[in-house]
Image (cartoon, rainbow, N blue to C red):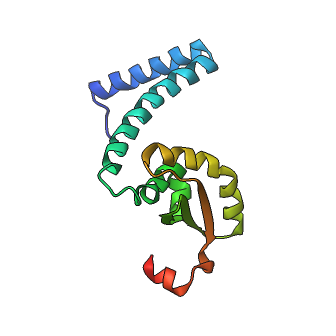
Amino acid sequence: MRQTSLAEQDELRSGARLGTMLESLGPQTASNFMNRDFAHVRSGLEKVIGSGLRQISPAERPVLAWPLACGSKVGARTRALDFAGGVLRVEVPDVGWRVELQALAPQYVAVINRYAPEKVKRIDFVLAGALSSEERRRF
């Protein structure tokens, strides 16, 4: 069994002390503390991502921003296909996913529009099996 170094022990004690301090402040204060830190990180990441997306053609930005808007779990099961006329088309695995994501579409549109100069007006969720053979070859 590996022994922990003094530095690791200090780090563990510091983490435990921080946890104890946060617990003593109460759950709401601890939650606010953590959210504030994550908000700062999120803000920094959004700036980096936004500057990277500015180097891409405006018509492609909503497609590339889809995984940022929907998150990794949804992004793993869906795929942004194209963007034209203010409509982002996203492929989904089945009807259940389409129904769920349609309810969240306004939130996704708001996030994507922070990164894209050509504003997304709506998202169309397309069933994977509904793509034509020509569309499947394109994507």
Question: Outermost residue, bottom direction?
Answer: 133
What residue appears at the point 39 percent right and 20 percent down from the top-left corner? 14
Image quarter where the N terminus lies is top left
Image quarter where the C terminus lies is bottom left
Is 42 in front, or is 120?
Answer: 120
What residue appears at the point 53 percent right and 17 percent down from the top-left corner? 22
What residue appears at the point 54 percent right and 52 percent down from the top-left corner? 70
Reply above or below: 57 against 8. Answer: below
Q: How many marks?
A: 0
Reply above or below: 134 against 7. Answer: below
Is 86 in front, or is 74?
Answer: 86
Is residue 50 found left or right of 78 in the rendered image?
left
Reply above or below: 85 against 43. Answer: below
Image coords of residue 87 (percent x, y)? 56, 61
What residue appears at the point 58 percent right and 17 percent down from the top-left corner? 29
Image coords of residue 131 (percent x, y)? 58, 79
Is residue 48 found left or right of 76 in the rendered image?
left
Reply above or below: 80 against 32. Answer: below
Image coords of residue 13 (percent x, y)? 40, 21
Image coords of residue 10 (percent x, y)? 33, 21
